Image: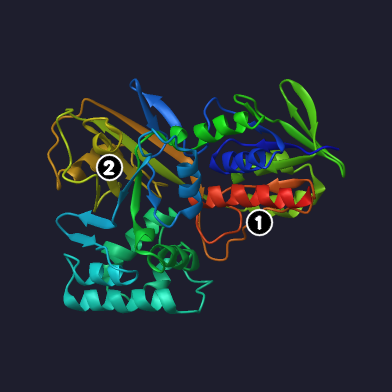
């Protein structure tokens, strides 16, 4: 039959896959169960404002994601990302800033100039980081906590373990040392700009999924929002999707749903049994984002700060990034045992940095399954499956990064590429 592809799931992976296929001239339909594209990185409306279901930050090393965003940005539009040299400010205890030097010298200079560390700690960090970037041994079975045990406790507490939590959204005691090393290498082992922090200036749906959908339609594809695929029936010649509107046959399907939803569609297909079994063993970690509106005249001294001794790890000033004056976003990763008063505690953490005055309104958003727990030796499936007409896309498929936008974008493009090779 003529190639007619269904992409199930309108998150970043699904949008990247559908866009790639449409631009290659393939007849593609993108199905999304909700009314908003973006999946676990999408726009939400709160208090009359467009916010996000979670405050995200990107790395300069996210080459595929940045390429997709930039390629779809209209020439006259405001830049969607705010690029900042890596700075980790956690007043009054710790501060690290990487200058514009060739990598990895910028990391070395940042570590040696860090405030809050003694000279022994700085030298220990520099030596360990150098070994991390150059050692060929893979710490496959180690947790980050085990991997960093040779480092002084101050460094583990102020630097390495906070980086693990923010990058892998998994506690250091159970997080994969190999994936942590891969992230550090990607950020600091290539170009200076790879370690930059990129803050979105638009809501997450407007940053990539919505422009991708517009381009897909321009190429002749279709986007079906609020249309849940309820079942799949796969034969050697076609894959049939069932929705509220009935059943439709497609030549190929890309399953771009979140891993926790994979079994609901793939379990009845014998060729996908092993994939479903592996993914069903995943555990998940929540992320909480607390939006707090202060007086619009209030402004943090920097766009973001790291926070210590509390449930929140970071606070972002959306007045500076999104033009939403006085609005701060607190982020608590690995939030499995988040107390009910976590936003009260987060505001208390902020008091060490600034005094914003009383809050005008507050809202907490908890993504209970924001990402899979990135543990050692986690089995992650390839984008190709044992069924020749079914492919996978998502941040959980095989790759060097944990559950990030880059993993999703890379997986979507790879899945589409593997499908195109069959046509």
Residue sitting nearer the eye, 328 or 312: 328
Image: 403 above or below 173: above
Question: Is residue 14 something that shows in the picture?
Answer: yes
Q: Mark 1 points at which residue?
A: 381
Residue 131 versus residue 70 in the image, above or below? below
Determine the image quadrant of residue 212.
top right
**Residue drawn at (52%, 75%) of the image:** 138
Q: Residues within 10 Å of mark 2 (few under 14, many from 20)?
A: many
- Looking at the image, do the residues carrying marks 1 and 2 touch, with CB atoms under 8 Å apart? no
Name which residue lies at 63% across and 40% down: 23
Q: Please provide percent x and percent y for residue 108.
A: 28, 72
Residue ID for mark 2? 316
32 to the left or right of 98: right
The spot of residue 319 in percent (x, y) is 24, 34
N-terminal-most mark, 1 or 2: 2
Q: Nearer the viewer, residue 57 or 364?
A: 57
Image point (41%, 69%), residue name: 189
Q: How far apart are marks 1 and 2 (CA)?
A: 34 Å
Q: What element carries label 1?
A: loop
């Amino acid at each position: 039959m003529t190639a007619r592809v269904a992409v199930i799931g309108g998150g970043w992976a699904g949008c990247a896959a559908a866009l790639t296929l449409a631009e290659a001239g393939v007849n593609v339909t993108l199905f999304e169960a909700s009314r908003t594209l973006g999946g676990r990185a999408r726009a939400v409306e709160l208090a009359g404002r467009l916010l996000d279901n979670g405050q995200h930050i990107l790395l300069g090393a996210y080459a595929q994601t940045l390429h997709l965003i930039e390629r779809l940005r209209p020439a006259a539009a405001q830049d969607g990302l705010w690029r900042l040299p890596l700075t980790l400010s956690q007043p009054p205890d710790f501060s690290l800033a990487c200058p514009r030097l060739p990598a990895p010298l910028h990391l070395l200079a940042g570590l040696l100039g860090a405030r809050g560390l003694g000279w022994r700690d700085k030298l220990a960090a520099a030596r360990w980081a150098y070994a991390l970037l150059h050692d060929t041994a893979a710490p496959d079975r180690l947790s980050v906590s085990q991997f960093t045990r040779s480092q002084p406790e101050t460094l583990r507490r102020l630097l390495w373990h906070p980086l693990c939590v923010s990058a892998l959204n998994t506690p250091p005691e159970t997080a994969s040392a190999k994936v942590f090393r891969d992230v550090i290498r990607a950020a600091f082992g290539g170009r200076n700009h790879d370690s930059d922090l990129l803050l979105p200036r638009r809501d997450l749906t407007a940053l990539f999924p919505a422009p991708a959908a517009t381009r897909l339609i321009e190429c002749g594809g279709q986007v079906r929002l609020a249309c849940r695929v309820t079942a799949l029936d796969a034969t050697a010649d076609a894959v049939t999707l069932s929705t509220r509107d009935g059943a439709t046959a497609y030549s190929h399907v890309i399953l771009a749903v979140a891993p926790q939803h994979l079994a609901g569609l793939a379990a009845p297909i014998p060729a996908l049994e092993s994939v479903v079994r592996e993914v069903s063993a995943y555990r998940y970690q929540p992320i909480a984002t607390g939006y707090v509106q202060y007086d619009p005249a209030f402004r943090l001294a920097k766009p973001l700060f790291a926070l210590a001794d509390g449930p929140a790890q970071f606070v972002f000033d959306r007045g500076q990034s999104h033009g939403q004056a006085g609005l701060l976003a607190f982020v608590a990763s690995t939030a499995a045992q988040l107390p009910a008063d976590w936003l009260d505690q987060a505001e208390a953490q902020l008091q060490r940095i600034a005094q914003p005055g009383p809050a005008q309104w507050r809202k907490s958003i908890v993504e209970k399954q924001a990402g899979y727990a990135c543990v050692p030796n986690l089995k992650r499936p390839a984008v190709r499956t044992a069924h020749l007409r079914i492919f996978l896309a998502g941040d959980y498929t095989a790759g060097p990064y944990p559950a990030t936008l880059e993993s999703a974008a890379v997986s979507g493009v790879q899945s589409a590429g593997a499908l195109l090779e069959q046509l």
